[in-house]
């Protein structure tokens, strides 16, 4: 049953994101993600073009860091490196103290599956599986027994407020509901690092706000560390910290505007 979920709650609460970020003065928890001197380049025709020039970044437990920057500035490249999906040319992503590219391929896959949720811009739910099967998939791939994985998947869906849609197929859901399902899948089990590429990019303003409220709540209540790329200034209002990527370098915008 979903007695803990009030389906009207998301729309009733009128929260000013700038106000809520202003009162968020908690001391950062342990470091979940650390990027050390990360550099990357892409092949542009026959020349190699550098797009990340030595990025240093930390995301702590309970912290929501928003990455902004013009289109083509390298946000997706950076997120994929942070999540251990792509290897940087130089430097090292470190998750939970583990230097990702010093791990064996099996250890890296285990760490990614166990600790890291990655939400792509196109959220890539599998259409042939129901919503709850989509969400339980990472656990099943991890060898969790089906009954247990389904139970955890239902809990994740309750968390994101769409438990009643568990038996539907993704194509029967709205964009916002699919995005919630993708976030449930990215956080199912004990994953505690969320890396999301423009998670509200395809959503209307109201739905985007409820997705952001959900991610914010996961950070505040569960200590999830989150790194989100976005173009949307409204998303930045939910962040503890906004970093800006331009010309391959990160600038901490909150530090720049500080008195
Ligand atoms: N696989 C690739 N091959 C060649 N160029 C790429 C590849 N992936 C990204 N790029 C280029 O690298 C730059 C950064 O891309 P991306 O990280 O997707 O930026 P953003 O997410 O900020 O829009 C862009 O100029 C893009 O065209
Ligand atoms: Mg991108």
Image (cartoon, rainbow, N blue to C red):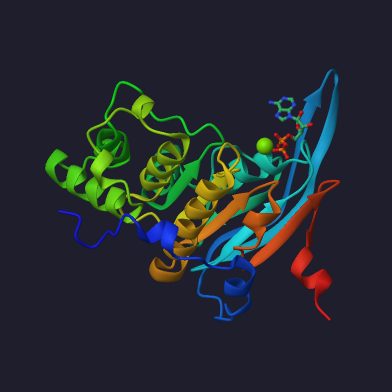
Foreground of the two, 164 or 50: 164
Residue at point 54% right, 67% down?
Answer: 63
- x, y (%) of residue 32? 51, 63
| Vertical comparison of 58 with 82: above or below | below
- Quadrant of the rendered image holding ligand 1: top right
- x, y (%) of residue 100? 53, 49
Foreground of the two, 106 or 82: 82
* 223 lies left or right of 93: left
Foreground of the two, 253 or 170: 170
* 237 lies left or right of 193: right
- Asked whether residue 174 appears in the rendered view, the answer is yes
| Vertical comparison of 166 with 241: above or below | above
- Asked whether residue 102 appears in the rendered view, the answer is no
Q: Quadrant of the C terminus?
A: bottom right
Residue at point 70% right, 54% down?
Answer: 233
- x, y (%) of residue 219? 47, 65
């Amino acid at each position: 049953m979903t007695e803990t979920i009030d389906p009207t709650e998301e729309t009733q609460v009128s929260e000013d994101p700038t106000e809520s970020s202003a009162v968020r003065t908690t001391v950062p928890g342990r470091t979940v993600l650390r990027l050390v001197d990360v550099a990357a380049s892409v092949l542009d025709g026959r020349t190699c073009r550098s797009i990340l020039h030595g990025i240093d970044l930390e995301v702590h437990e309970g912290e929501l860091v928003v990455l902004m920057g013009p289109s083509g500035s390298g946000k997706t490249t950076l997120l994929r490196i942070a999540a251990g999906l792509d290897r940087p040319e130089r430097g090292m992503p470190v998750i939970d103290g583990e230097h990702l590219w010093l791990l064996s391929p099996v250890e890296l896959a285990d760490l990614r599956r166990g600790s890291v949720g990655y939400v792509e811009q196109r959220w890539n739910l599998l259409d042939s599986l129901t919503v709850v099967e989509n969400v339980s998939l990472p656990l099943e791939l991890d060898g969790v027994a089906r009954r247990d994985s389904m139970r955890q998947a239902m809990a994740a869906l309750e968390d994101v407020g769409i438990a009643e849609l568990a038996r539907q197929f993704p194509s029967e859901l709205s964009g916002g509901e699919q995005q919630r399902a993708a976030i449930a899948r990215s956080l199912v089990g004990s994953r505690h690092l969320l890396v999301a590429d423009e998670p509200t990019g395809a959503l209307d303003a109201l739905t985007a706000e409820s997705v952001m409220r959900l991610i914010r709540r996961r950070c505040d209540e569960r200590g999830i560390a989150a790194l989100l790329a976005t173009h949307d200034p409204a998303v930045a209002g939910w962040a503890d910290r906004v970093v800006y990527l331009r010309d391959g370098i990160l600038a901490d915008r909150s530090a720049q505007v500080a008195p």
